[in-house]
Amino acid sequence: MKKILTCLLATLGFTAACAQLNYEVDEFQTKGRDNGYILTLDGLRIYIAGDTEDIPEMKNIKDIDIAFLPCNQPYTMTTEQVVKAAKIIKPKVLFPYHYGQTDVSNLPAELKSEGIDVRIRHYE
């Protein structure tokens, strides 16, 4: 299956790399589950984080154009953790998602000095 998926991705013109969680964070973020992915499409790099927190391995995620970071306790990050993760990853554009009732309206102001364009959408 992995070989078929790799061929399909290449045919479609993009590649994917798994940013896998290789250890337990807590009962909500477990090893091998809720992985993040980096998609590359014609040079555009998109990071889609799974249900994660601002883990140290994010320092290895480089050259991201668009990042999707989850913000919803207790399952993912707090707004403070999203800010910290965004400052580590340094995407050009950030879409917070999975935030449910969490107030993410502070994120654009928190990341403005970093040059990160925060775009808040209501995904329902």
Image (cartoon, rainbow, N blue to C red):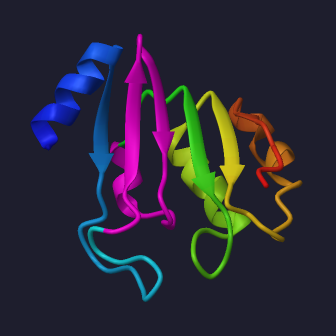
Q: Is residue 113 left or right of residue 94?
A: right
Which of the pair 20/113 is nearer the observer? 20
Q: Is residue 50 above or below residue 89?
A: below
Residue plotted at (48% across, 66% down): 52
Q: Is residue 65 left or right of residue 82?
A: left
Instruction: Give the image location of residue 113, x and y in percent.
Output: 76, 36
Residue plotted at (31% across, 64% down): 21
**Residue numbers of the magenta segment:** 33-60
Instruction: In the displayed orientation, state which residue is furthest to the bottom.
Output: 27
Q: Quadrant of the N terminus?
A: top left
Instruction: Give the image location of residue 73, x and y in percent.
Output: 66, 78
Q: Is residue 100 above or below residue 50?
A: below
Instruction: Give the image location of residue 13, x and y in percent.
Output: 34, 14
Residue plotted at (31% across, 80% down): 24
Which of the pair 5/40 is nearer the observer? 5
Quadrant position of residue 84:
bottom right
Q: Is residue 11 left or right of residue 59?
A: left
Residue plotted at (83% across, 71% down): 101
Magenta residue check for 48: yes
